[in-house]
Amino acid sequence: MKSLQLSLVILISLALAPISTPIYARPGCTDMCGKIRIPYPFGIGTGCYINEWYAVDCNSSTPYLSAINNLELLSLNLENQTMAVNFSMNSDCVDTIRNNSQILSVDLGESPFLFSREDNKFTVEGCENAVILDQGGNLVTGCSTICQNQTTNQRDDCYGVNCCQTTIPYYLKAYTIDTTSLQRQSPGGVCGSAFVVDEQMYLPGRFSGKSAIFENSFVPISLRWTLRPEEIGESDCSSMARETLYLGNGTNIESYKCNCRPIEEGSPYLTNGCQGVSISFGVLLLVAIIFALYKLLKKTKDKRQKARFFKRNGGLLLKQQESADEGIVNKTTLFTAKELEKATDHFHENRILGRGGQGTVYKGMLTDGRIVAVKRSKIVDESQLEQFINEVVILSQVNHRNVVKLLGCCLETEVPLLVSEFVSNGTLYEQIHNETDEFPMTLNTRLRIATEIAGALAYLHSATSIP
């Protein structure tokens, strides 16, 4: 049985094992720069990227996009075709009178990259009013803050007071930010700034007109990268998806992308790049068969073990005696081990009623709601087996108000289990020796108890017959 379990574990492990390691870079190229993975179509080194726009320089374990002013690369997402980069930001932090607006222009040029509409937000901090204009000078979106001196009341939100955010309605290739101060003089060195930022990477600082991002002079921005179908070429792309990206000037760009299947990892833009958990149907079928065989063998083993215990505990002798004696009216009820385990909560410690030299008594409840006492013997004396079975047969016939009735037994366990009715008021010994004011043990009461005991003994000697 143990060897079968071991075989099952080994087969399941083999079935779930990856065929090979996922491939993220071209042969001979590295796919890591520091702690950041650089998957193809991006690449580190000549011949490792799909074109010059996707070239990455790894300098001191930090990746940079060499074709776009060496922007620091923070992360890459193959599934969404996005990357996060660090952009420098423009801000104003002087204690001077400012009557004119500040202009900041950003242009990605001829690159295949766009400022992501879904991931970025336009953010204004300080006492400012700012708008974004597209390449044609058209208004894209804007945001204006509510001025408030905050020296002690620090906040961690961005809902209008000294900070506001708004969405960007479409993708942008370039934009201009026009910022105007809402007061002629900045109070106490309060900084004003306006920028596009990756919403997931932006953490508002303790606002006094200043943020954690401003202190670093860089802001993380999400860029969407695009590919043409001829650039993808041969790859593991089973179904090339096309997406239309709408720009602010009324035009659009068609972008194509591939994804690995849910059970695979790697770059889908490389031949055999997607690798992962591939489960053979034959192996799965074999595992299912072995598992079913294991359950069948375990069930057969349990059945044989119960039959062996039943024979050893006198079950065959019990059936033989009940069949031979036609005068037996009440046949002994044979409970299964499963029934009594359920009744006693698997013989839990808190179900114990008492312990003795011969065994332990548990309180249980049968499926029909009857409360019973289950006695589990400590050992089996095979020399006394016939006498034990005779007593079981006799006690099963007993029906007297002063004798605890034996309801049945279980012989398919390692030691016999006897099931009797549960006496809720304790033992006779406890009633006699623990006298209370509510139930005084008078002479008449003691005589009645003695008389009923004598009657019960007489019943056991005369009204029952030995098989």
Image (cartoon, rainbow, N blue to C red):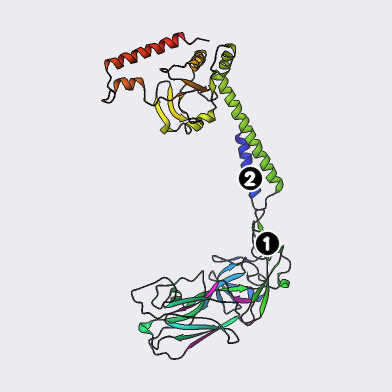
- Could you tell me the amino acid type at mark 2? Ile
Q: Residue at x 54, y 15 (%)?
A: 329
Q: How many marks?
A: 2
Point out residue 237 in the picture as x, y percentages from the top left corner.
Answer: 71, 64
- Give the residues drawn in magenta, as a range: 96-125
- The answer to whether marks 1 and 2 mark residues whose Cβ atoms lie closer than 8 Å is no
Q: Residue at x 40, y 24 (%)?
A: 423
**Residue 341 visible, this angle:** yes
Disc 2 target residue: 12
Q: Residue at x 32, y 22 (%)?
A: 431
- The answer to whether residue 418 is above or below residue 161 is above
Query: Which of pointers 1 and 2 indicates the residue nearer the eye?
Result: 2
Q: Is residue 154 left or right of residue 20?
A: left
Point out residue 66 in the picture as x, y percentages from the top left corner.
Answer: 59, 76
Magenta-span inclusion, residue 120? yes
- Determine the secondary structure under disc 2: helix
**Residue 91 visible, this angle:** no
Q: Earlier in the sequence, mark 1 or mark 2?
A: 2
For this orientation, the residue located farthest to the left is 437
> Residue 328's image quarter?
top right
> Residue 62's image quarter?
bottom right
Name the image quarter holding the N terminus: top right
- The answer to whether residue 436 is above or below residue 122 is above
Q: CA distance from mark 1 to mark 2?
A: 25 Å
- Could you tell me the amino acid type at mark 1? Gly
Disc 1 target residue: 273
Front residue of 190/216: it is 190
Front residue of 423/183: it is 423
Magenta-span inclusion, residue 425? no
Point out residue 430 in the picture as x, y percentages from the top left corner.
Answer: 33, 22
